[in-house]
Image (cartoon, rainbow, N blue to C red):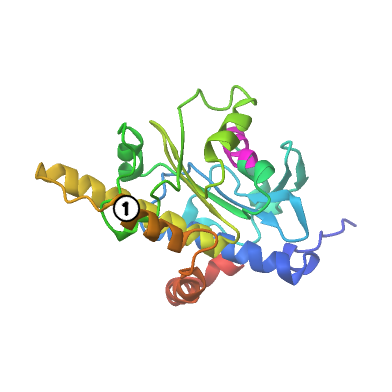
Amino acid sequence: MSIRPLSVRSRVTEAEWKVRSDLAACYRLIARYGMSDLIYNHITAKLPSNKELFLINPFGMHYTDITASCFYTLDLEGNVVDKPEGEFGEFPVNRAGFMLHSAVHAARHDLGCVIHTHTRAGMAISALKEGILPLTHYSMRFYNAIGYHDYEEPTVDETERARIARDLGPHSALILRNHGLLAAGPTVPDAWNLMYWLESACKVQLDVLSTGREICMPSHELATIMASRYGPQGKLNLAPIEWPTMLSQLDKEDSSYRS
């Protein structure tokens, strides 16, 4: 008689299940707010019990199908430590996703969640030499507080991980030139907050540039103050306030991400 394996929910801690649920919610939110790219890109989160391990989605699933039970657990070398059950385990792990996300997770122990996107606005800004401009309070948050990484052929050279970490530096956001955006934070809600406002800043900048009119640029001093307010030691961390509202929206529409 075959022995049915224990469900994910029954064999992980409450702390890990919370991370899994938040991570699944983040996938649903990225899709809900128009930031997904078919089956591509990833959102990853470190395990609360072991910062050398992180959760990643099965490659091939749409973001709207992601649930708390479906994640692979990888170590920083790409080894599968835990595999999802049933049909989820039939999907592979994407090598490019591992490369990018492991670079951040290995270099920055303070960042527990990493989001990477290929949005239209994000890719457009990534192709502009000047990158993000401090045009509004959205984008002033990233003034001298975002890294830039030149495009390299994906998945080929593992040494790129060191260059990704170098270019991210002390920041929590990275523009991958000619590619897309990356945002990270200590928690899933923090990373979601950063990516949402980074994407919004990209959209607004494209709107402003498309007018062809003279730009009103804030002073260096003002932009620096605004960036510091949202930095790691800043006073304006709105992620904990936003997150319950985001989950409430999801639960009203489809709470299956929690399964």
Circle 1: element type: helix
Q: Tell me if residue 4 comes above or below residue 77 in the rendering.
A: below
Identify the image quadrant of residue 236: bottom left
Residue 122: % across, % down: 35, 43
Look at mark 1 in the image and give the residue it sits on.
201
Q: Report if residue 148 lies within the magenta region.
A: no
Q: Tell me if residue 71 comes above or below residue 233 in the rendering.
A: above
**Mark 1 surroundings: few (<14), some (14-19) or many (≥20) residues within 10 A:** many
Identify the image quadrant of residue 252: bottom left
Residue 182: % across, % down: 48, 45
Q: Main secondary structure of the magenta part?
A: helix
Residue 21: % across, % down: 61, 66
Image quarter of the C terminus: bottom right
Q: Residue at x 53, y 64 (%)?
A: 189
Residue type (three-letter) at the residue carrying disc 1: Ala
Image quarter of the N terminus: bottom right
* One can see residue 233 in this view: yes
Image: magenta residue range: 95-103
